Image: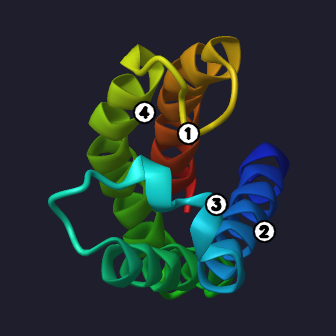
Amino acid sequence: MDTFSLFLKIILGILFCFAGIMHIIKPKNFKNFIPDFLPKLTINYLFGVIEFLLGIGLFLSNYTKHAAVGIFILMIIFLPIHIWDATKIRPAIGSKKIAYIRIPLQFLLMYWAYYIYLNA
């Protein structure tokens, strides 16, 4: 694995582990991202655990490719949620500007996961 891939793997691993932990210890921060027709707390904890495990998976060489694919798929799942959030009068993420910045960020994270997958 080249140096840049290793750097991305470490950054993405830390980011996803941190996000997963935040889902567990601060579930109220994520409740407005989850549509009302879904069980908010259950979905929040489920995705928190998934994010944490995918982050850990990036640090385990036997699971790096699987974790990268999982992150790519997760970002695809989250993309409509972030688009929906950007269309709300008061986005869950904060300001409209941040909500709109988050959308291309999803594509960047997808690219990072893909790059890690190719170079693992």
Whether label 1 touches label 3, CB < 8 Å: no
Query: Which of pointers 1 and 2 lies earlier in the amino acid sequence?
Result: 2
Q: Which residue lies under the disc numbered 4? A: 82
Query: Which of pointers 1 and 4 lies earlier in the amino acid sequence?
Result: 4
Cα separation, mark 1 vs mark 3, equals 8 Å
Nearer the observer, disc 1 or disc 2?
Answer: 1
Quadrant (top left/top right/bottom left/bottom right) for the C terminus: bottom right
Helix, strand, or loop for circle 1?
loop
Q: Label 2 sits on what residue type?
A: Ile
Q: Residue 18's x, y, as percent?
A: 75, 71
Whether label 1 touches label 4, CB < 8 Å: no
In the depicted structure, whether residue 37 falls above or below residue 61:
above
Q: Which residue lies under the disc numbered 1? A: 92
Q: Which residue lies under the disc numbered 2? A: 14
Nearer the observer, disc 3 or disc 4?
Answer: 3
Cα separation, mark 1 vs mark 4, equals 9 Å
Whether label 2 touches label 4, CB < 8 Å: no
Q: Residue 112's x, y, as percent?
A: 58, 41
Query: Which of pointers 2 and 3 lies earlier in the amino acid sequence?
Result: 2
Q: Is residue 115 left or right of residue 2?
A: left
Query: Which of pointers 3 and 4 lies earlier in the amino acid sequence?
Result: 3
Cα separation, mark 2 vs mark 3, equals 19 Å
Cα separation, mark 3 vs mark 4, equals 14 Å
Q: Label 3 sits on what residue type?
A: Asn
Using the image as rendered, state which of residue 80 and residue 12 is in the foreground.
80
Q: Label 1 sits on what residue type?
A: Ala
Q: Quadrant of residue 25?
A: bottom right
Q: Which residue lies under the disc numbered 3? A: 29
